[in-house]
Image: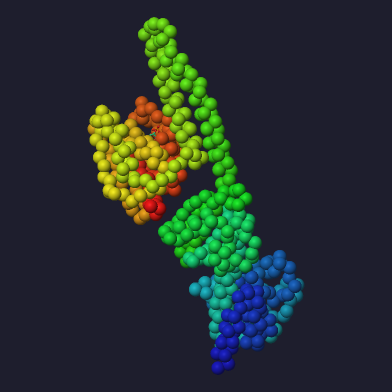
Amino acid sequence: MNETRLLYDISQKLNSDLDLDRILSDILSLTVPSVDARDGSIMIFDDSGQVVHQIMIRKGLSPQQAKEEVGRMLDGGLAGWVVTHRQGTIVSDTRRDDRWLPFPNGGPQAGSAIAVPLMRRNKVVGVLTLIHPEPDHFAADQLALLSSIANQAAVAVENARLFRAVQEEQAKLQAILNEAADAILVTDDEARVLLINPAARLAFGVRTSMLAGMRLQDAVDNEALLALFRKAMEKKAPQEKEIPLSDGRTLFATLTPVRGVGWVAVMQDITYLKKLDEMKSDFIATVSHDLRSPLQMIYTYAGLLPEIGPMNEVQKEFVEGINQSVEKMSALISDLLDLAKIEAGMDMNIRVCRMDSLIRASLTSFLKPADLKGITIKTDIDEPLPLVAGDPTRLEQVMSNLLDNALKYTPAGGEVTVAAWAEEGEVIVEVRDTGIGIAPEDQVHLFEKFFRVKNEQTQDIGGTGLGLAIVRSIIERHGGRVWVRSQPGKGSTFGFALSVTSVF
Ligand code: ADP
């Protein structure tokens, strides 16, 4: 009964603590009297067998001395024997048992010793050694008792170690969050703040320290960010968005659902990219404007040349060459100017648009060219489509750029289909062709300015490389998205989606 009570007391005491150093001294202070020993030592190993904690019999050792002492005990001493044999043992007379290594330079007198392993999941996680000044002090039944205690102790040690590991991980995570240049904000499923790092505090001017559990809209005063959360939670899907800050900076936020946590927003400062983009747009606008007038002059003078006097064939050919180049340059300049205007949000006349009639209107001017090239144009439009808010001229420009490409990059005998339908609050339009298609590595660059696929099939087809960049700019200005699916040799599908408008 005494033993049972002792075991119970020990497990109570050990399991109510998570501090490893305290647990180790508790183990010693509880076991020493339980077998009427005089003193004891304990050491704990990590997964690789290294000693991570120890309390020695010989007190006052420097860390280096303690390390050497432990090494000695594990190499040829009693502790080593216990680890190798994975069982407890008694040294009845230390003078007659070579597993006992006398303490160098003094230390307490040991006549007999008892040592047991701390076992956890079949692994030795530590060794407990107790000593008594007299020989023949320990008996076999004490070995059994001590082994039971050691197993209780092993559980407590493991708990403490797990706890410490969790704490260390948490500290690491905290350090990463604190030091991260990106703003990071974590909320639960109901958009209550769980965590906000210093970069995010700075970005959104958050001063309160008691944020945990606060509703996001009470903690952060930024409509763009709140809208992003609302949209993500409504759609239950990741979202991305540019977030303008009150200090003039712009963050690019990615909001992702994390199971068991809620939502994690990671926001990168893209102010310099925005500035660069603005500078590029300004530059393009100025340059293309300044290029227009001299070009107009070249065109006019080239047109006047035949009026001055008769020209021979070569001269006529040269003039034709000049005219063609001027036309190409005008097309490029007008695309550039267009793009600059769209990006700057200039000349946008938003009204309620009927996409079905808009698509049909854009198609009319392509019927003849398609016929001439031997390409069939088909439509698959769910009429009437819900209304969208947009600039009809710009949306027609989108359609004509896509149709123009479809005809340009589809050989004779091919087919171009325009499909449109409504889906989940959006109007979707797709232009599909049976043309040359686009390789996957080129697809990612298609909507970039000046990107043109360069291969044998495209080398004789003219273009500025701005058509799709214009398409993307216009659609994004309308709050929509664009995409491409394509298989080389089979054909391409270019599509865009616009939100259905609720304004009638
Ligand atoms: P471009 O003036 O060169 O046509 P775009 O921006 O309209 O410029 O298109 C960029 C590139 O994408 C084109 O050069 C072409 O290689 C490719 N492309 C666009 N549309 C298609 C299509 N329907 N089929 C195959 N390739 C296409």
Q: Is residue 154 above or below residue 452?
A: below
Instruction: Farthest residue to the front: give it.
Output: 504
> Which residue is more in the foreground, 348 or 145?
348
Percent across and percent down for residue 82 are 57, 74
Residue 60: quarter of image: bottom right
Q: Can you see residue 213? A: yes
> Which residue is more in the foreground, 53 or 202?
202
Q: Left of 342 or right of it: where is 492?
A: left
Q: Is residue 150 above or below residue 412?
A: below
> Residue drawn at (28%, 38%), measured in percent from left and top?
416
> Residue drawn at (24%, 32%), measured in percent from left and top?
413
Residue 394: quarter of image: top left
> Residue drawn at (35%, 42%), measured in percent from left and top?
494
> Which residue is more in the foreground, 127 or 475?
475
> Which residue is more in the foreground, 372 or 166?
372
Percent across and percent down for residue 115 are 60, 79
